[in-house]
Amino acid sequence: MSSPREPQKVTPTLLREWGLPDPGESKKSRGEAMIIGGSRLSAGAVVLAGEAALRVGAGRVGVTCDGAIADVVRIAFPEAGVYESPEPGQPADAVWNDAVKSSDAVLVGPGLDDPATTREWLERVSGPDTGCLVVDAFAVGVFRDVRRSDLPESLVINANLDEAAILLGRAVDDLFTDLPRLARELHAVIHCYSAVASPSGEVWMLDEGGPGLGTAGSGDVLAGAITGLAARGLSPERAAVWGAWCHGRAGDRLTERMGLGFLARELAGELPAAVLDAGS
């Protein structure tokens, strides 16, 4: 097995060189994202992820969640189109299928808390008609229960250390050694904390962020930012790097002003300024 490449540090200069897709003249030109998740225990996760997708410039966002929390999501997130999940084992309706097919990026995971339901969602979004798929939170834990060949070619896995350990089958020894091997095995871009790894062997290192990012809902904001950037047209690798950097930079900006104790919803609100800080 070849040795992992030396990590490339992510800086505003690198992000400026990459740039972002032209926003065009309307919301339709900035891409559409679908966020799938939520539960009675965690209705806010899809709201945080969806807002983050809009805050990094996605044009439109749909949210799919359990019917029991759908009205709560509609009130909390008036900018989104809200779809109610079908009953377990039942097919999704044509309206939802069309919405997913028209989405440029789909996020599965924020707020989900049942393994069978989560696996079913991953199976529902399988196939070539789905755009970039971002797998987060509970969906990372059941990822290996679904055949990789059934999932979209464009795939980002956003994992914390515990979730990365589930994928590895052991504790993470070194992010910059373990993640590239895992990315090649799963044919997926993988982000975990300070590292992003691509199936090609490329690895990026992130320094932004700090203890303040360890707050409830922070990971939902991060996953939404990656999804929004993928919806805008960035490649999976660049969406993951851009999203992780902007999430960390938003945390740094809030820490400078407030110290420790800011909320995930404030992270989402800080994302547009973080994008500007990269010079785009």
Image: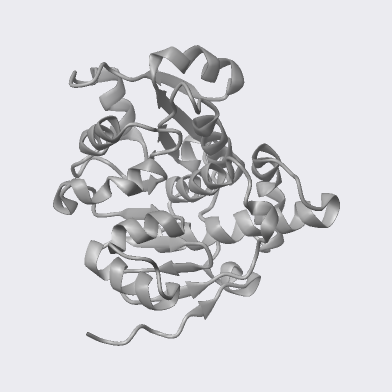
Vertical relation: 18 (above or below) 213: below
Rendering coords of residue 173 (x, y %): 41, 74
Residue drawn at the location 61% of the way across and 54% of the way down: 247
Quarter of the image with the C terminus in it? bottom right
Looking at the image, which residue is at 37% across and 70% down? Answer: 179
Q: Quadrant of residue 168?
A: bottom left
From the viewer's side, name the closer residue of 106 and 193. Answer: 193
Whether residue 105 is visible here, answered yes or no, is: no
Residue at 60% from the left image edge and 21% from the top image edge: 76
Task: State the residue lying farthest toward the front.
Answer: 170
- How many numbered callouts? 0
Residue 208 seen from this side: yes
Query: Residue 178 at x, y = what percent?
Result: 36, 73
Color style of the picture? one colour
Q: In which quarter of the view is residue 120 placed?
A: top left
Q: Please, is residue 184 above or below residue 161 in the view? A: below
The quarter of the image holding the N terminus is bottom left
Residue 53, how many percent across, how many down?
53, 41
Describe residue 90's horizontal placement relative to residue 72 as left or right.
left
Between 74 and 102, the residue placed more toward the observer is: 74
Residue 275 in the image: x percent, y percent? 65, 55
